[in-house]
Image (tube, rainbow, N blue to C red):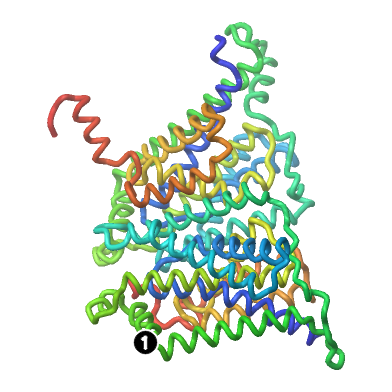
Amino acid sequence: MFLEQLINGITLGSIYAIVALGYTLVFGVLDIINMAHGEIFMIGAFVGMLIMSKAGAPLPVAFLGAIVVTAAMGLLLERFALRPLRGRPGASHLASLISTIGVSILLENVAHKIFGSGNHLFETPFAEISFTIGPVTVYLVQVVILLISLLLMAGLSLWLARTRAGKALRAAAENLETAGLLGVDTNRMITITVVIASAMGGVAGVLVGMAFNYINNQIGLSMGLKGLAIIIFGGMGSVYGAMAGGLILGLSETFVVAYGSSGYRDAIAFVAIIVILLIKPQGLFGQAPAEAKR
Amino acid sequence: MEWLNPYHLQVASFMLINAILGVSIYVTLSTGQLSLGNAGFMSIGAYTAALLSTQHQLPIPVGILAGSLLAGAAGILVGIPSLRLSGVYLAIATLGFGEVLRAVLINWESLTGGAVGIAAIPQMGRVILAGARDRGFTPESLGLQSNQFISLTVFLILLAGTLLTVAFFLRLSRSRVGRAYAAIRLDEGAAAAAGIPITYYKVLAFSQGALLSGFAGALFAHSTSFVSPGDFTYHRAVEILVFAVFGGSEHIFGPVFGAAFLTVVPEALRAISEYRYILYGILLVLMMVFRPQGVIDPALLRRFRRSGKGTPA
């Protein structure tokens, strides 16, 4: 029982980590919270559902489709809702927050018009396959989710640490202006960041569909809120904070539901925000206090 | 008296409640902070007022006062941890707060009635009419039908509440506190260097906004006589934000105008009403790109005033 819950928690946590990574990448480079990320993730889940459950195509095609659509949405988001606000004299830091809220409410209600507000079944062809190791039952879906998330996290870490583009992104995250002076094409870097973050959201959307077996047009808000809680918890802009925070939230939610009450499962993320803000406001892995940053 | 029908008066009443909500987010925005929890604070006011009058038979004004104060107190509790840091923390914490509060309203069925909500809340107009009847007054003596009188009473009470709110914050903006808010919005660092306790003023502004949302919520409960968790979703919070962003967040007339315009136009044009939230989303992006200060800003108001008086200032 305990081991099975542990596996459930890690699976859920790795999905949360992928969602949170999308927020933290954009925050790291641009210092803004992309409130539309949750809804881009929701669109990714719907694209995956259409490809796999409705068209009956295999899983890799669903991932590919979700990535293509969400990456394109990231491109549009950056071009029309973020770039026009950038570098304008006297622009308040709230401007990008508000314009991405606009995109989020737009996407949620467009999805509502197309798909309605009810639940849609997300069918995975191998959903029923499981195997037993000793006393523990493990579903193949869980293994696939875990593998994909780990691959994604490892790939992102390697890309950030070892490649030229990753280095440029880290430089841009450190200080956008200085990076620009040193020859980094910051506009291009920002676009790449938003596109990669959005594509990760698309992958996370398909993973959530696989894990929960149903999706609706409100998952963007509920999962987005958890992603936001995780980046506050792990430290804004910290890649490892997002991963660790995701796992911690996934595990604590699973165990609270297993050994406590399920009605307030979604409240855990909020309680975590308030507690961390009171005790260690820069987050678990945050470096500088947020006050000093701006 | 044909034009004075309950439907027109109801639209006007919603317009006034929305105006108070618009001011509630404006107060927080006037220190450069964004709150997404005003729908949540509104629900605190609405449920407190509803429960006090339905389960404890307390008079309506007591419920409205208690609801507003409780919402303000909740604002202090959420504000203190999140306002020590930069603006995005407040936006996220209040977004989470609103959603958790809604989960509590749905799950705590013994107190809140769950997803169904609370019905049969005493309606201000009806209560006043019943009281007046006891003293031998009939609305017919004013040439009004009962339902006209009820709607008109509600409208007048809300109008008084709105005027009081606007007058208070108009005065506040010219006081020491208002100047501190403006200084913090323009440059937090410079304001702190000038000796303004910025966390104190940010928490003050935020809890004033929360109190106002609670006030609007309590008035809403006693105007519609029915509340449910569905009235206080994230959509409502975004709607309140749109009032201020569209109307203008640099002068108190901005959110009032935004609330009035965005309440009346969808009522007048039914075709728009169906796509309301899609349009809100587009509106938020367009406003941020082309006119971040909103339709009404101090420069526009000065121009009006100048042309009105005919004297160049």
Q: On the picture, is A135 further left or further right than B161?
A: right
Kindly tell me whether residue A265 is visible in this rendering.
no
Question: Between A49 and A250, which is closer to the camera in this rendering?
Answer: A49
Q: Residues within 10 Å of mark 1 (few under 14, many from 20)?
A: few
Quadrant placement of the C terminus of chain B: top left
Whole-percent x, y for residue B79 in the image: 49, 61
Question: Between B60 and A225, which is closer to the camera in this rendering?
Answer: A225
Considering every residue shown, the one lying at the far right of the view is A135
Q: Residue at 63% of width from left, 82% of height from top?
A: A148
Q: Residue at 67% of width from left, 64% of height from top?
A: A51
Q: Which residue is mark 1?
A: A164
Q: Under tag 1, what secondary structure?
A: helix
Q: Where is residue A269, by image quadrant?
A: bottom right
Whole-percent x, y for residue B62 in the image: 61, 38
Question: Between B120 and A161, which is closer to the camera in this rendering?
Answer: A161
B253 shown above or below B88: above
Considering every residue shown, the one lying at the far left of the view is B312
Kindly tell me whether residue B154 is visible in this rendering.
yes
Considering every residue shown, the one lying at the far bottom of the view is A134
Q: Residue at 49% of width from left, 30% of height from top?
A: B264
Q: Chain of mark 1?
A: A
Q: Where is residue A85, by image quadrant?
A: bottom left
Whole-percent x, y for residue B137 in the image: 64, 11
Q: Residue at 23% of width from left, 35% of height from top?
A: B302
Quadrant placement of the N terminus of chain B: top right
B69 shown above or below B156: below
Counting labels gives 1
Q: Amino acid at mark 1?
A: Arg
Q: On the picture, is A267 further left or further right than A23?
A: right
Q: On the picture, is A42 further left or further right than B194?
A: right
